[in-house]
Amino acid sequence: MKVDFRINLFFIQFIFFVLIIAGCSRTIPPPPAPSPPSVQSRHTDQLIKGIRAYEAGRYDEAERLFSQMIASKPSAPLLMEARWHLAKSYVALGKKDLANDALADFLETYPKSAYEEEARAMLHRQVPTESTKVIAITWQPEKTSSLKTALSSFSEVSVDTIFLEISNKQLIKSAKAPLESLSDDPLFIWIDMAKKMGLRVFLSVPLRVPIHTTVHVLDRLVQKSRSKNDLSEKNVILDLFDPEVKKELLLFYRNIARYSWDGIYLHQIGYGLEEESTSYIALLYQDSFSEKLEIERLFEKERTFGPVARRRPASSQFWRLNGMKSRYLADLLRQIHLNINGVNSQTEFGIEIPEILLIDPARGMVETALDYIALRDAAFDFYLVASTGTHRRRLLESLSRYGGGDRAWFVRADGETVSSLVALPVQGVVLSKATD
C-alpha cells in the first residue's frame, strides 16, 4: 500500500508539471490587425497636405496633390475643395490658361459655393481686359497691412498687378535672409498674399539701395552732401562708380531675386547735377579720354535764368563726361538685369524714366546723366514714365519719335481719369498708392 501511494503521488506531480509547461508554452494570439483607413480618410489627409503645401508657398507640390486627389474621385464636398485649391495653385504658379479654365469650370459647377465671390474676382483679374493693358497699383504693406482694403479703393477697374514698395531697411533685411528661412521673411509673406489673390507682384526699388550698411569702409562708398561728419542716411549717396559699391549692388539684386516676385522696376536711376564727380569718376574719365578731368571747369558760374538759378555746362569736357556717365549707368542697369535673370529668368525688368528725358532730351541728359536712346536700346521689358500729366501729348510724341512706346507704363497724375489713361497707346497704367 505504501509503494502504491508513492507511485500515484509521483504520477500526479508529473501530470501537473506537464500541464504547467503546456500552459506556459501556449502561443498568445496576436491582437486583431487594424482595419485599413477608409477612402474618405485618405482623401481628407491628402486635402490637408495639399492645403499646407499651398499655404507654405510650395505651389508645385500643392498642384500635384490636388490633381491626384481629383483623379481619385473623392466625395462631392472634398472634390469641390480640391478643385478650388487646384485653381488657386494654378494662379499662384502663373499658369494663366489652366487657371482660367479651372476657375471658369469651378464657377459653372459650384455657382453658389462659399468661394464664388473670390473665384469671380480672381478670374476677373486673370482674364485680359479689353485694352489688354497692365493695370497696377502700388501697395506699401508696412503702412497698409490689408491688401483687400487697398484693392477696394480701385473696385471700378480690373487691377492685375501690385507694385510692392517697402522700406530700404526691410529690403536690406530681406536680401540678407538665409535661404532656408525665406518663407518666414515679411517680403515672402507679402508676395504670397498678393499671389493668392491672383495678382502679379512687381518690386519697386531705388537703384541706390543704401547698401553701405553691409560694407565696412563707409568713407570709400559715399559722397558727403554736407559736412564730413554728417553721415545720416538722408545725406549719404552711394557712388555707383566705386567698384566696391557696384559689387555690393549686384550682390543685393541677386539676393533679392530669390523671392518669387514677377517683376521689378528701378527708380531714382539718374546722376544729378548736385552730385559732384568723385575720384572714381575722374579716374574712369582719364582712362576713357586720356585727359585729366577738370571739375572746376565743367560749369559756368551759377546764373539766374528766370526764377530758377541753374548751372550750365561750360565745356566740351562736360558733354564727354556726361556721355561716359550715361553709358556707364545703362551698362550697370543691364548687369543688374542679367544678375536678376540669372536667378529668376521669368521676371520682368523695368526702369523709371524721368519725364524731362523725353520732353527735352538734351536738358534731361544734363540734369540726370541719362540718355533715353541708350536706355531704350538696352531693351528692358518696360519703361515707367513718371509724369505730372500736363505733358502727355509731348510724351507720346517723343515715344513715337524715339521708340519704346509699346513698352511704356504711365503713372496716373492728379486729376487724370483711369479711362483716359487706358485709352492711351501704352502697355501699362499705374494708378496710385494704396495706403491708409
Image: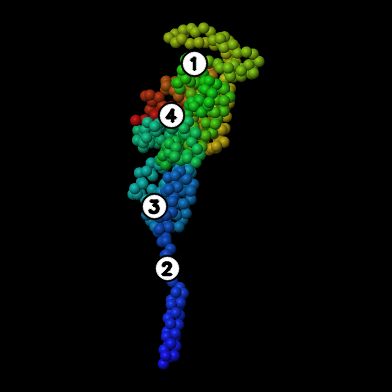
Task: Specify few, some or many for label 1: CA neighbours under 10 Å numbering under 14, 14-19, or 20 or more.
Answer: few
Residue mark closest to the camera, 1 vs 4:
1
Image location of residue 28, percent across then percent down: 44, 71
Label of residue 39 in the image? none
Q: Nearer the viewer, residue 224 or 190?
A: 224
Q: Which residue is at a point 45% across and 21% down the rendered structure image?
A: 232
Is residue 375 visible to us here? Answer: no
Along the polypeptide, which appears first: circle 2 or circle 3?
2
The residue at 38%/41% (across/down) is 121
Task: Tell me where residue 189 appears, x and y as whole percent.
Answer: 43, 38
The quarter in which the C terminus is drawn is top left
The CA span between labels 2 and 4 is 63 Å
**Label 4: few (<14), some (14–19) or many (≥20) C-alpha neighbours in 10 Å:** few
Q: Nearer the viewer, mark 2 or mark 3?
A: 2
Amino acid type, mark 4: Ser
- Identify the residue under disc 2: 31
Compared with 349, 239 (above or below) is above
Q: Amino acid at mark 2?
A: Pro
**Observer-nearest residue: 283 or 414?**
283
- Callout 3, which amino acid? Met
Mark 1 and mark 4 lie on one chain; the one further toward the N terminus is: 4
Which amino acid is tagged 1? Answer: Lys
Judge left or right: residue 382 versus residue 35.
right
